[in-house]
Amino acid sequence: MAYLKNKEFDKAIETLKSYDAKDEITGSLVAGAIGDAYVELKNVDEAISLYEKLLRIIRMHSLLQLC
């Protein structure tokens, strides 16, 4: 996250992609942060792809809570 704050977006993407999320919540935060970095780099298509992944995780998590 420090790379995002320092506007080192390529390094942020590289670091976050190598992060091994242990749960869905952390994984969704990572996907969102990578998406944010792609937006800053004007790579909107890649950002949308990650935001859609994030949305699927949130929906799945919400459905599991209903059970």
Image (cartoon, helix red, strand yellow):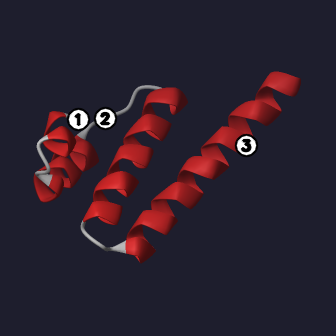
Q: Mark 3 or 2, which is nearer the eye?
A: 3
Say which mark, if any, is on residue 20: 2
Residue drawn at (36%, 53%) of the image? 36
Quarter placement of the C terminus: top right
* Pick the front one: 10 or 15: 10
Give the residue furthest to the right: 67
What distance separates the C-alpha of mark 2 from that of mark 1? 15 Å
Q: Nearer the viewer, residue 31 or 36?
A: 36
**Could you say whether the residue bearing mark 1 is in a helix, strand or loop?**
loop
Disc 2 and disc 1 in contact, CB within 8 angstroms: no
Could you tell me the amino acid type at mark 1? Met
Name the front one of labels 3 and 1: 1
Above or below for 58 versus 36:
above
Q: Give whichever of discs 2 and 1 has the lower sequence position.
A: 1
x and y percentages locating residue 35 in the rendered image: 39, 56
Which residue is under mark 3? 59
46 sits to left or right of 8 = right
Q: Is residue 8 above or below residue 57?
A: below
**Mark 3 near mark 1, Cβ–Cβ under 8 Å?**
no
From this viewpoint, is residue 53 visible? yes
Which residue position holds label 1? 1
Cα distance in 3D space between marks 3 and 2: 21 Å
Residue at 27% across / 49% down in the picture? 17
Measured as percent of width and height from the top left, residue 45 is found at: 43, 76
In this rendering, the label closer to the viewer, 2 or 1: 1
Neighbours of disc 1 within 10 Å: few (<14), some (14-19), many (20+): some
* Depicted 37 relative to depicted 33: above or below: below
User: Mark 3 or 1 closer to N-term?
Assistant: 1
**Residue lying at 62% horizontally and 43% vertically, measured from the top left:** 57
- Residue 23 is situated, as x and y percent measured from the top left of the image, at 48, 26
The amino acid type of the residue labelled 3 equals Arg
